[in-house]
Image (cartoon, helix red, strand yellow):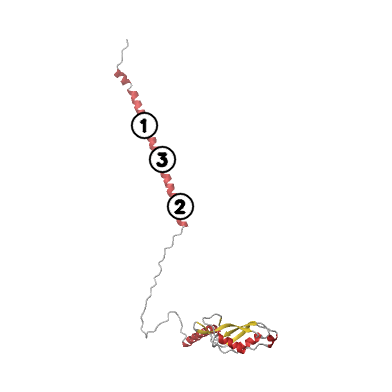
Amino acid sequence: MEAKKSQKADLENKKGLFLEIGLVSILALVLVAFNLRSSDDTGSGMDMRIISEEMEEEIIQTEEEQQQEPEPEPEQPEPEVTTELEIVDNEAEIHNELGIVDAGDDANKQQEEVVVTDVDEEQAVVEDEIFVFVEKNPEYPGGEEALYKFLGENIKYPDMARDNNITGTVVVKFVVEKDGRITKASILREIGGGCGKEALRVINSMPKWSPGQQSGKPVRTEFTLPVQFQLE
């Protein structure tokens, strides 16, 4: 009959097995922990490398932009203009800083003569101008009624026009000068038979007119006058 071992004795025999299992477990935990740490170190190293490369790219881009874009020139403040008035005595000598040379009275007189000449030329042009429309028209002495009375009394009907029964109106243009004289008479409309020539003779023999006026001053004025030739 075999003798039975107690439960305590069995556990004692398995003590070495349990120790080996524990060592293996500890070793496995150490390996796992070491691998985790290595992976963390590797990941952080990769991150640092990526960050370093990005920073280098930004630095290179910044340097290129600085080289391409010139720095703006600083604005220079505008100089302030100040006017200083210096009071001097009447007897003090004044220096000519502008370098203008005084040519003397002769030069001043020469300049005055040139200016006077220009004014005289302008006045001559104005005087020679013949106005067609004026503020006040020239007028025969005594008015329009006296004018046609003068024409009727002085015109002699040309024989050629009478023989050929020529009648009508001759239109004459002339200039009333500033002193009222009649000048530059010419025919605008002729009817023939010597009527135009007779009309010019009578108009050139007219007395002085009252001249036309512009801005209150007498001016040379062009005037047009119809002269009728009618057989009775």
Q: Secondary structure at mark 1?
A: helix
Tag 1 and tag 2, C-beta contact below 8 Å: no
Q: Residue at x 39, y 40 (%)?
A: 41
Type of amino acid under label 2: Gln
| Residue on which disc 1 sits | 29
- Mark 1 and mark 3: span between their CA atoms? 21 Å
Q: Identify the disc placed on residue 61.
A: 2
Q: Foreground residue, 63 or 135?
A: 135
Q: Position of residue 91 (x, y in %)?
A: 37, 86
Type of amino acid under label 1: Leu
Q: Residue at x 30, y 18 (%)?
A: 7
Q: Secondary structure at mark 2?
A: helix
Type of amino acid under label 3: Gly
Mark in the foreground, 1 or 3: 3
Q: Foreground residue, 131 or 95?
A: 131
Instruction: Choose the circle earlier in sequence order: 1 or 3.
Output: 1
Q: Position of residue 111 (x, y in %)?
A: 49, 85
Instruction: Choose the circle earlier in sequence order: 1 or 2.
Output: 1
Q: Identify the disc placed on residue 43.
A: 3
Q: Please identify the residue farthest to the top as the structure is shown.
A: 1
Q: Position of residue 31 (x, y in %)?
A: 38, 33
